[in-house]
Structures are given as structure tokens and as C-alpha cells.
Amino acid sequence: MTVVKQILQTRIKKADIEEYLRDKLKSALFGGVSISLTPVGTRVTIYAMRPSRVIGPKGKVIKEVTEALEKHFNVENPVVSVVEVEVPELNPYVMAERIAQDLERGVRYRRVGFWAVRRIMEGGARGVEVHISGKLTSARSRTEKFSEGFIPKSGELAMDYVLEGKSSVKLKTGVFGVRVLIYPPDAPLPEEIRVKTFEGSQGA
């Protein structure tokens, strides 16, 4: 197997695991997962706003998650731990799920979109985009974007720093999709990037 194929398979597996955890731990407000290999197995760290719901009564839920990772996703010796999300406003998974829950309760999409942008920026983000798609005002589906601050669209800044979370909710008019992009407080702005120079180099 080539290195490229191996990387792609790893990313696909992680995406599948994220989708499973997002559905399984919806009530816990799933905030993402990190997976790393260790000498004794695979460390799986789950982030959530409500860690107790990830663990479940007498550890039932976390045991089910561990078994699913091992049997259905072929994760070798998974060691699962739970970490509470400290700043939910800066976690795109949590914010996307909050938006979906508000839409399910009947809150207007514009109100939810502006509320989310304001909360994320107040949390210290350098930029945010909230995309809500579905049959918003008519029988035709479309996407409405709410944004503020700076969000890079391409290059290293976009790949290394932009955080993305998605969720969806089924309403009477159909399925609504939610996508949240956050540029965190510790991410550099373009004007803060410095090009390294080498001593002794001469201009043309």
C-alpha cells in the first residue's frame, strides 16, 4: 500500500468514526475526537460538553463505544477517554449541534445564525462562518451564510488552523444541514506571517 493510500484510508476511517460518535453521543454534545497510536494500543480521546453522558450509567455508553471501535472500525486495542469541552463557543462540532437543536425547537434560522456568529466571536474567535442549508423559505433548497471576521479559504492557514463542524436535523420541510467554520484565537492573521530570510543572500 502506498503512503498516499494509507493516509487516505486513515482519514476516511476517522471520518466514519466521527460520524458514528456524533450520532451516538448527540445528547452529550459531541465536540470532536482525536486518535493516536501508542505502544499499548490506540488512544481515542472524545471531547464533549457533557462527559457524563459519554460515560453513561455504570460506564455502559463508553463500553459500547469501545466495543464498536474495536469490532466495527477495526481500531486496535482502543483506550477511550473523555475530555470536557472548556470553551464550547470555539468548538465547531458543539456549535453546529446547538444550531441544529435550536432549529429543531422551531427557532428561525436567521436568528440562530446571527446568535451563533455573535457567541463564537465573543468567545475570542478571529473569524467564523455559519452555513445553514435546506428549504429555508420556499420549496427550493438553498444555503444561507452568516459570517464575521477572517476565514482563510485556501493555503496553509486554511488547512492548518480552520476548524470545521457539521450537523443536520430533520424538520417538517425536510433535512437542514449546518456547517460551522471557526478561525481560532491562536491562529495567525496574514499580516502576522513573516517570511524567513537567510543571511548572506543577495537580491537581484
Image (cartoon, grey):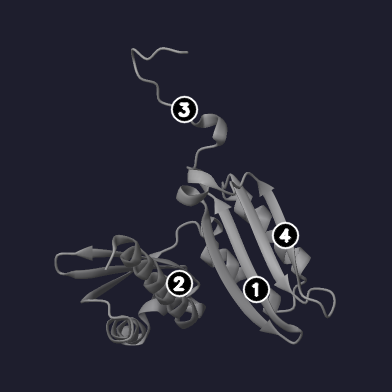
Q: Residue 5 appears at what percent x and percent y?
A: 34, 66
**Measured from the top left, where is residue 71 in percent x and y?**
28, 86
The label number, if any, that marks residue 194 in the structure image = 3
Which residue is under mark 1?
177
Q: Are marks 4 and 3 in contact (CB under 8 Å)?
A: no
Judging from the image, what secondary structure is the residue with disc 4 in? strand
Local crowd size for mark 4, using a 10 Å CA cut-off: few (<14), some (14–19), many (≥20):
some
Q: Mark 2 points at which residue?
A: 50
State left or right for residue 129 relative to residue 189.
right
Label 4 and label 3: CA atoms lie apart by: 32 Å
Give the percent coordinates (x, y) of residue 138: 85, 77
Q: Distance between the residues labelled 2 and 4?
A: 28 Å
Quarter occupied by residue 142: bottom right
Query: Residue 145 has which mark?
Result: 4
Q: Alpha carbon of mark 1 to alpha carbon of mark 4: how far? A: 12 Å
Q: How far apart are marks 1 and 3 (CA)?
A: 38 Å
- Tag 2: Cα neighbours inside 10 Å, few (<14), some, or many (≥20)? some
Mark 1 touches mark 4? (CB < 8 Å): no
